[in-house]
Amino acid sequence: MLKFVKHNLETISGVEIYPIISLSIFFTAFVIFTVWAMTYSKEKIDEVSDMPLKD
């Protein structure tokens, strides 16, 4: 089955850019979410973590 997929992908011009684009998008999102998580305030984290218990 891999032969069929590989053959179809070889016939598409410029297909080698798609893995690079997808890796770039994933890496950028990962870095942004990591920075966001590290810079999130401790007070806000405590407030959000107590929300299920307040009701």
Image (cartoon, rainbow, N blue to C red):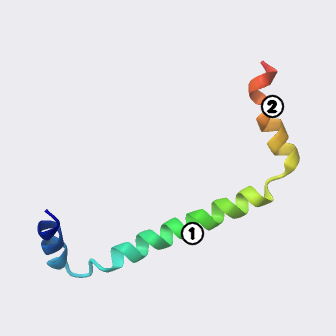
Is label 2 in contact with label 1 (beta carbons under 8 Å)?
A: no
Q: Earlier in the sequence, mark 2 or mark 1?
A: 1
Counting from the top left corner in percent of width and height, residue 5 is at: 16, 67
The quadrant in which the C terminus is found is top right
Reading the image, the residue beneath label 1 is: 28
Look at 26% across and 81% down and name the residue there.
14
Q: Residue at x 57, y 63 (%)?
A: 29
In this rendering, is residue 46 above or below 15? above
Could you tell me residue 45's position as x and y percent?
80, 44
The label shown at residue 50 is 2
Drawn side of residue 1 relative to residue 45, left or right: left
Q: CA distance from mark 2 to mark 1?
A: 31 Å
The answer to which quarter of the image holds residue 17 is bottom left
Q: Looking at the picture, how far across and down is residue 54, in whole percent?
A: 81, 22
Q: How many neighbours does mark 2 have within 10 angstroms: few (below 14), some (14-19), or many (20 or more)?
A: few
Task: Tell me the amino acid under the disc marked 2.
Answer: Asp
Q: Residue at x 77, y 37 (%)?
A: 48
Position of 37 compared to 11: left or right? right
Q: Secondary structure at mark 1?
A: helix
Looking at the rendered structure, which numbered label has been put on residue 38?
none
Label 2 element class = loop
Q: Residue at x 27, y 77 (%)?
A: 15
Q: Residue furthest right?
A: 43
Q: Above or below — where is 38 with respect to 13?
A: above
**Could you say where residue 18 lies in the image, as x and y percent from the top left?**
34, 73
Number of on-image labels: 2
The quarter of the picture where the N terminus appears is bottom left
Amino acid type at image mark 1: Thr
Above or below: residue 49 compared with residue 24: above
In the figure, 55 relative to 42: above or below? Answer: above
> In the depicted view, which residue is nearer to us: 42 or 14?
42
